[in-house]
Image (tube, rainbow, N blue to C red):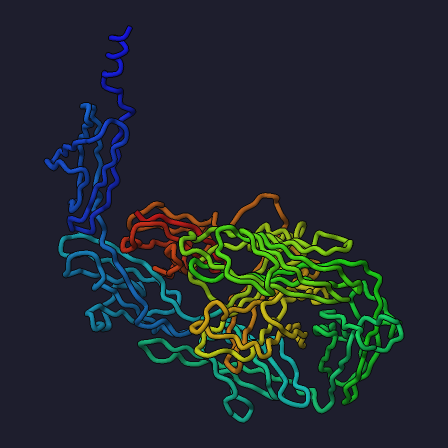
Amino acid sequence: MKPILLGLLLAPLSSSAFTVSGLTTATTCGNNTGSIDITALGGTPPYTYAWADGPITEDRTGLAAGAYSVVVTDDLGETGSWNGTVAGGTLFVQTSFMGGFACPGESNGSFVVLQSMFNGTPPYEIQVYYNGAYATPSGTTGDGDPIYYGLAEGEQFSVSASDAGGCSGSHEDVMYGPFGIPISVSNIVAACNGANGSVSLDNSGDWPANIVITDAQGQQVYQYDQVSSEFISGLLPGEYTIMQFWTWSMNNSCAPIYSSFTVPDLGPFCGNVHGTSWYDLDADCVRDVGEVGVPYSVLQIEPGDQYVLTGGSGEYSFNLVNGSYTMAQLDPTLIHYCPVSQPVPFVVNTSDPVVDFANGSTVPLDLVLYTVQGVARPGFTYSFSGTVRNPTPQVSGPVNVTAEFEPTLIFLNASPTPASVVGNSITWNLGTLSSFGQTTFNASFTVPVTTPLGTVLTSSLNVSNTLTESTLANNVATLLNTVIGSYDPNDKVAITSTGASEELYFINEDEWIDYTIRFQNTGTASAIDVVVTDTIADELDMATFEQGAASHPFEVSFKPGKVVEWRFADINLPDSNANEAASHGMIGFRMRPRPPLLPGNVIENIANIYFDFNPPVITEPSVLVAELSTGVNSTSASILLLVPNPASDRVVVSAGGATIADLRIFSMDGREVMRSIIRNTSGVIDIAALPSGPYMVVVAMADDRKPTTHIIKL
């Protein structure tokens, strides 16, 4: 048996299945720039290569378009083969609107054919077609690229071109420009005895415009550039005119359009109702030392269906025209000591009436956890903040908060100083909470540079105390945050109670909406004060407002016209150049929709962020659409189709019949590397110039959705 065993050991081993594959890259026009990457799998290396046209190298570069084949032989003589075709490339035709967009109602738009960036061999023959005929250039740029003029907004044009070697290509696009819709005016708040009127301007349905506002005497009172939405306060009563215009880089300004609005005058026949709501411990209707205010409590004024919000100490104030009114507290957990009967009548007669509320409550102890979080970007600081609130008159036991943060995050610091930080777990001991008291905490982390875009970071928080609570369901929170690249540092995001969708509010499942407004000082000096305003959508019920967590101390109040205002006085927010990590702030709140909410109803909100005396920064709209749940999970990313993927050069992008506004591509370190304006249900992008690797694609839809997906560049 031994000789047989020795013979088995010395015999050549049988090779595994031997396959040969190849990956081709097309040529650029008539140039010999094609390539083939051969991969041999199985068999026994080393391998030898025999190409039909002579070379014996593994891979090929500098190839012309055509058919190629190779036979690969392994070390034991086993062979495999591959044959394929290197495609001939097309001429990549590019255009630019640096000639100027079209003015409203005019045919003065222009575009440039960027022949200096074509990928073929000059000279080029170019044909341009629009207005029902072939066009001739109106001039050339400094690079010799032809300029074409005379298009209206929305007018299509096409460009066909061929190079000296006969390589051809084409490009189609549409002229952009504003429709010239006058900016809409809403939420006008009358002035009362001075410059305290306000107005909201909305230009979201049209191109961002420059506006100048003048008073009845023709004096300029405001000027803003690139306005989409604006909240203007501090207005005297009277007539105002809005001049709305657009300016492009290489042609004259468009003719302005005009609109107007009036700020009514409440004075001198108006006044301010104010007072305090507090927990009257001894029920004597006198606020004694140590008796605390009821914070963030919603009061309703009739007639007019107006709402007032108490501040952090239970105080409130509101301007009203002379007349007879009633006021009622809407919190059903409060016992009315004084006044016992509500609604409470009062009269404004060029006076400032005081209406106080002394309250009792027998609600058992119940702590509530509110959270907000910032954005997560590779290489930057990510943070979350929390507030533990005691909405009852009962005093809590010692409060503990535990946070289990995403293990991939790198812990930086926390405030107040945690009792412990072990692994990815943080514990705070926050002491007891008095009647209607609250306490806050926050933590900051570094997102590793290597974190891929699209990664979902998951953290969980839990609050407890040593006494029994009526419910523990509101003591926990789960934070989900998708890692992104470049972003607008000032935004407003909405999360429904089920968290089932980022675009939909499911009528039969969701109960409320959590909003987070995030802001960053990107100026050149610290911001002493920051003011945030939010005009609440009509679809939301003001009576259900709940104040959430915030990154910094603040005061909050309701203003006429369903406006919520937060004031961060003396915030001293550093600019991002001096201290990027500390330049961020955020605030959260919760509301419920106002019934009846029907399928198709749109809940849309924006926020206005004022840094000191600068014009406000306007966030992109936060949009939710009410629908009935089908029980099937879906995401807006599923409507995107990128073909081919992976890809080496040109990619067709489609959105299932929906209109694409623009497309941005981000590298995995968060840099924006490409942007393409499409304005159609599909389009073609060229990624040939991008280095090989994975990228994140963010598409802005015409209906304000922003689905994301990934693509691999070969």
Q: Residue furthest left?
A: 54
Residue 321 pos. (x, y %): 73, 84
Give the residue displayed 69% in from the left and 87% down from the top.
266
Residue 604 in sight in this render: no
Q: Quadrant of residue 157?
A: bottom left
User: On the picture, is 130 further left or further right than 473?
Assistant: left
Exactly how many numbered labels are in the figure? 0
Q: Is residue 11 left or right of residue 212?
A: left
Q: Nearest the camera: 516 or 15?
A: 15
Report if residue 94 is visible in the image.
Answer: yes
Rendered residue at 38%/67% (across/down): 176
Name the one closer to the observer, 515 or 101. Answer: 515
Q: Could you tell whether 577 is left or right of 592 in the image? A: left
Residue extending furthest toward the bottom? 217
Q: Is residue 363 above or below residue 523?
A: above
Rendered location of residue 563, percent (x, y): 64, 73
Q: Residue at x 70, y 74 (%)?
A: 311
Residue 389: percent from the left, percent from the top?
A: 70, 63
Give the quarter of the figure containing the N terminus. top left
Q: Relative to the observer, which residue lies in front, 689 or 631?
A: 689
Query: Compared with residue 41, is residue 606 higher up or lower down, i.e. above or below?
Result: below
Q: Position of residue 268 (x, y in %)?
A: 71, 91
Left or right of residue 30, residue 412 in this image: right
